[in-house]
Image (spheres, rainbow, N blue to C red):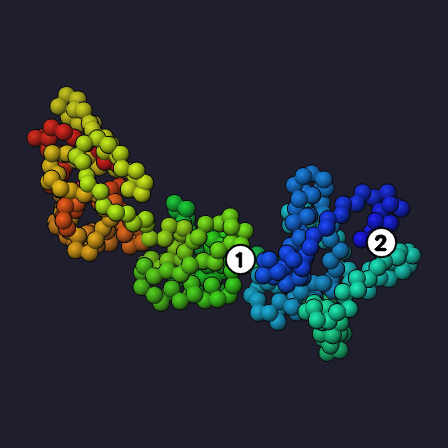
Amino acid sequence: MEFCRALCESWGVPLTILRTDVPALAQARGESVEQAGRAVRYEAFRSLLERGEADLVATAHHADDVAETIIFRLARGTGLSGMKAITEYGGIVRPLLKLTRAEIAAYAEENHLSHVEDSSNEDETYARNYIRRTVLPAFEKVHANAKEHLVRFAGLASEEDEFLERLAEATILRAAGEEWVPVDLPDVLFRRACLICMRRAAGGEYARANLEEIAKLKAAQSGKKVAMPLSKRGDVAARYAFREGKYIVFSSGCEGVLFAEVPFQPEAGAYPYPMNFSVRKLEAAAGKYPRKAGELYVDLDAFPSGCVVRTRRDGDMITPYHARRKTLKKFLTDRKIPARLGRGLAVIAKGSEVYVVVGVEIADGVKLTEKTRRAAVIG
């Protein structure tokens, strides 16, 4: 820091200094000192860019860093995405990325530029230092151009990764805030599509084990689910991956909100969340009631006394509008309503007889007829 302060003063360059207790932060976050330090640096970079105090942030990463990163990630166990190594994004640029450490050092010596070596760079208990000082030189003993080949590999991997990303992205279906991945995709596209969804679901924080759990859903029955990891930032709601038919569905809607039953009053009124519907009376015009497609119209006098509003139960039956009597479970299955959503649907019922599945269907026995005197719409 003192070296940078003196250099900036001599060159007339503005300097911003940030002080943070990185070891304490690492302990609080359950991270290594290296991870926490990197997070602090990039948080500072983003802050400077967002406040407009910098147009770009240029880091000093070079080709050796790319080679070291490739070795580190391969040893840790990564996929093709991890081979992208060090990239530019969001105003953060790497102008020295194609130069080796030796080339930069030669330039500094030729132009009489002084520098300071961080003493921690000598400590080989840090993985990256060990790779830099021991592993990478060993690679170069095997092949003199090992470093350049690793960097070239990173570039090729990045191109192929971007191509796969576009292919996988195109297979994902989206509706009502959910993402659907077909289970019959080739494994490489299935994994990539699930990774895309998982990154969005978990705020970018996931492990290979999470992907393996999702892959198991391919052989599971519909309705099975696995939880996504929660974002450490706390800004992403809990989400799940469900097996539904021929798809894996990524959704924050787990299994609907269950609630205690309440009496149903065949009058106008509201049933607040989690039931979340209302009963609105209709006035006839010229002897006819106005109707809109998709609305549920009922004869309030056709409901037997003692009806309640509740969620579905085993043994529930329904005689849908102009249809045959069947179990509510089969009815919902026929309507292709997933079990995770069906369990939380509000129903109006007496005993095991269901008269309304709110938002879905009414029973034939409560439909509007020529004899209706009190009509209402439920929704």
Identify the residue at image location x=73%, y=68%: 129
Q: How many marks?
A: 2
Q: Nearer the viewer, mark 2 or mark 1?
A: 2
Q: Is residue 6 left or right of residue 185?
A: right
Q: Secondary structure at mark 2?
A: helix
Q: Which residue is mark 2?
A: 3
Identify the residue at image location x=70%, y=68%: 126
Above or below, 80 against 335 in this view is below
List x then y, in percent, for residue 361: 21, 43
Q: Which amino acid type is marked by label 1?
A: Glu
Q: Which amino acid type is marked by label 2?
A: Phe
- Give the residue at the far top of this rendering: 286
Identify the residue at image location x=51%, y=50%: 234
Q: Is residue 206 left or right of residue 272?
A: right
Above or below, 10 against 205 in this view is above
- Give the residue at the far bottom of this rendering: 142
Give the spatial CA distance, label 2 vs label 1: 36 Å
Q: Which residue is mark 1?
A: 205
Quarter of the picture holding the C terminus = top left
